Amino acid sequence: MIKRSALITGAASGIGKACAQRMAKEGYGVAVADVNMAATEALVQELTEEGLSAIAVRMDVSSEEEVEAGFDKMVETYGSCDLVMSNAGVQIVHPFDEYPFEDWKKMMAIHADGAFLVARAAFRRMKASGKGGRIVFTGSVQSFVGSKLKEPYNFAKHGVAGLAKAVAREGADYGIYTYTICPSFIKTPLVEKQIPEQARDLGITEEEVVKNIMLRDTVDGQFTTVEDVANTLVFLSKDQGALTGQSLRLTHGWAMM
Ligand code: NAD
């Protein structure tokens, strides 16, 4: 018997996948939303074989039509929209003076338009249900600091934390709480890809990228993990009204408040 439902974007890989697996184990019906349908369907099959409930949703978060259709499918299947994680993301690094406008627009489409479209779709359904819900954004330590080669990513991740604050104000009357989970580096495909790219663009070794860039400002030289994010999502899925609008920094001490 499914008591609650969750939709997670970018759920076919990395952070989103770990969160989808965890929420399914917590008893949620999970809408696994991504553009990579082979990986999405493989995850849904894995969860179903474990006796858990999940559906595959094709959703390019930069497409208004696909976002709305995906949420409709979720509500048709589970009858509710209780928890939404706006998590899909990509990283494109270039030196700032060489950053192609096309790549800037691609980053904005996924990170900025995507966060808006997913949060608005969630808000509409949570408000209409009369039961409220939780909207969780995946921010980053890059929501608070600036990093070389990542101007669009910094711009968008700062923006997502602001979006969560504004939606928290409008959502309060309807029992809609918002949060931004802000991890430092986690070894997912998104980060594995960046290590050689940053080494190339900065003229340093891959080991130096990890030690001197990715982990330099942590207090203990440790990566954050997908489990750290999934644990935080479970915590936020409970009744955390006192934390609405807040950003939670999972950063091993980087960018402490
Ligand atoms: P990942 O590459 O492992 O997974 C990203 C997923 O998003 C993939 O399954 C991909 O297919 C999907 N995706 C890409 N474009 C999409 C689109 N237009 N619509 C729907 N899905 C799309 O990356 P990850 O590390 O798990 O990153 C997830 C989120 O966490 C991103 O927002 C990223 O910026 C953020 N983040 C990552 C780290 C890190 O160190 N890995 C740290 C902080 C924040």
Image (tube, rainbow, N blue to C red):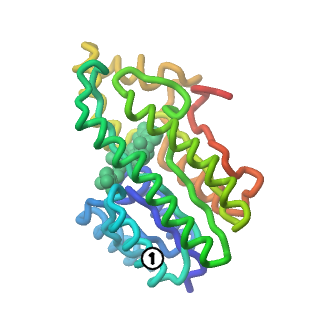
- Image height check: is 78 above or below 9? below
Question: Which residue is at a point 31% across and 43% down the rendered structure image?
Answer: 189
Figure quadrant of the C terminus: top right
Give amino acid for label 1: Met
Q: Which residue corresponds to mark 1? A: 74
Question: Residue 226: percent from the left, percent from the top?
Answer: 47, 48
Residue drawn at (63%, 49%), measured in percent from left and top?
166
Is residue 168 rendered to the left or right of residue 35?
A: right
Secondary structure beneath dot 1 equals helix
Closest to the observer, 57 or 156: 156
Mark 1 crowd level (few <14, some 14–19, many ≥20, 10 Å Cα) = many
Identified at 70% across, 52% down, the residue is 244
Would you say 91 lies left or right of 135 here?
left
Query: Where residue 116 sits: x, y (%)?
Result: 47, 54
From this viewpoint, which residue is outermost toward the top? 203
Q: Which image quarter: residue 2?
A: bottom right
From the viewer's perspective, is 99 left or right of 232? left
Task: Report if residue 186 is visible in the image.
Answer: no
